[in-house]
Structure formats: structure tokens, C-alpha cells
Amino acid sequence: MPEILLQARNLSITFGGLKAVQDVTLDVPRGSLTALVGPNGAGKTTLFGLLSGFLKPGAGSVHFAGSEITGRPPHESARLGLTRTFQIVQPFGAQTVRQNIAVGAHLRLGGRREALEAAEAVAARVNLQSQLDRPAADLTVAGRKRLELARALATQPRLLLLDEVLAGLNPSEIDEMIPVVRQLADDGVTVLMIEHVMRAVMSLAEHVWVLAQGRLIASGSPGEVTRDPAVVEAYLGQGAAARLAAQGARA
């Protein structure tokens, strides 16, 4: 059995009566590349907030690398090796790409020169080396997504939570980013990704959890979850699974 790096048990949080995440339990094995999917508003980013310490759960627990981190500040989780990216990218626009990445490197490296040198190596991993001296504000959407990934990588994570790193990219940009994410896993970084681009999920993920209305409704391989009637209903509405089955029977 693979070692479990991240363990969430019965996580729940409520905002003003809205049950945003309800009784979520999952295990992320060390060295895996897994995905969390679900319709808009399902609670996926909220769950990432609970896992990474940006939100405190109303119930449940989170363990990382054998230590309980439930409700601990994000910087403490980052020092242990759990880092996340954000769906809405907000770089330091007036600073260069190199300086932005160095901010992440400072988690492990105290000296400015060391951090800037580390930034150059990280930039190469996400194909930003030619942009190192450009102001971050001048980057395209795709460039900013790569920069967000690079800043997280600079912290030297053991587990990386990727929140829609492909959102806003065109098909060719997605095709260019998929191998970058795959290489992270090949390099030994455990990856749990939130993603709406299902062809990327099908290509990358070994295991998928499906969240709907704050609850996990399915898990398994990408092929298994996309055939699950509960998943079809969550994405396409009540009765959709039966309609698709009837269409298939008539075909």
C-alpha cells in the first residue's frame, strides 16, 4: 500500500447556514497525481482552503506527513511542504518574474542571492526562463498561470494543491501546460489538482474525487467517474443519466 501523505477526515464548514463542505474524507498517496472535480459552486476551492489552512473547519481533521495540521496557519503548512496555488492569479505586478518567484524561494532560503538563483532554476521547470526579467504585469494569462505555479514550486513543496491552473487558457496553451504538470509528478511532487478541463484530468489524473454541493459523490479512475450516473446528474441535471442511457439504447 502506498504511503498516505495527506489525510482528510470528515471535513465540514458552514458559512451563514450554507454547508459549503460536508463530511469530506479522502487520502492522497505520496507520489500521486490526483484530481478534484465538480460543478461550479461545488465547494472545491473551499476544500482546498481547509486542507491548506486558509480556512478552519467546523468539524473534521487534516493530517499531513503524519502531523495534524487542522486549522494551522498556511505558512506553517508550507514549511512542512504543503503549498497551494490560487485560481485568481495575483502576482506582484511591478516586480520581475524572477523577483516574484524568489518570494516563494525565501521560505527555504534566507539570502537574496540564493533566492534569485533558485528562481532561475524554477522558471526553467515551467518554461518561463525567457521571461525572467520582464515585469509580471506584462505577462499573458498563460504566463501568469505559469508564474503562479513557479512561485508555489519555489517553496519546495512535497504536496502541491493546484487550483485550476489551466483556467483561462486556450487549447494550445493547455496542451503546453499538461506536460509541465505531468513532469512535476515525475520529479516526485505529489499533486492534487482542481480542474474543469476534463481532457487534462483524463490525461493526467490517476484517481479522481467528485464534489457536488459540498459532498463527495464519487471517486475512482477518470473513466469510472465519468460513467457514474451520480456524476452525470451533478453536471447535467436531474434525469440526465437516464436520458443518456435511453439515447444509447436507441442508437
Image (tube, rainbow, N blue to C red):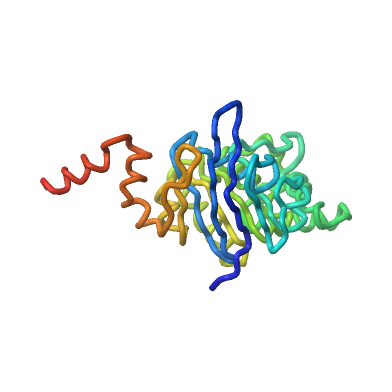
Q: Residue at x 72, y 45 (%)?
A: 71
User: Is residue 112 left or right of 72 when viewed as pictured?
Assistant: right
Which residue occupies the foreground of this view, 8 or 104?
8
**Residue drawn at point x = 22 percent, y = 43 percent:** 244
Image: 225 above or below 241: below
Quarter residue 111 falls in? bottom right
Residue 195 place in picture, x, y as percent: 49, 46
Query: Measuring 67% from the left and 53% from the top, which residue is drawn there?
Result: 129
In which quadrant of the rendered image does the N terminus lie?
A: bottom right
The residue lying at 36 percent from left, 45 percent from top is: 231
Closest to the observer, 194 or 220: 220
**In front: 133, or 191?**
191
Return the x and y of residue 209 as percentages of the image width and height: 47, 52
Q: Is residue 39 left or right of residue 46?
A: left
Image quarter of residue 222? bottom left
Identify whether 180 is placed above or below 241.
below
Q: In the current view of this chain or complex, which residue is farthest to the top?
A: 16
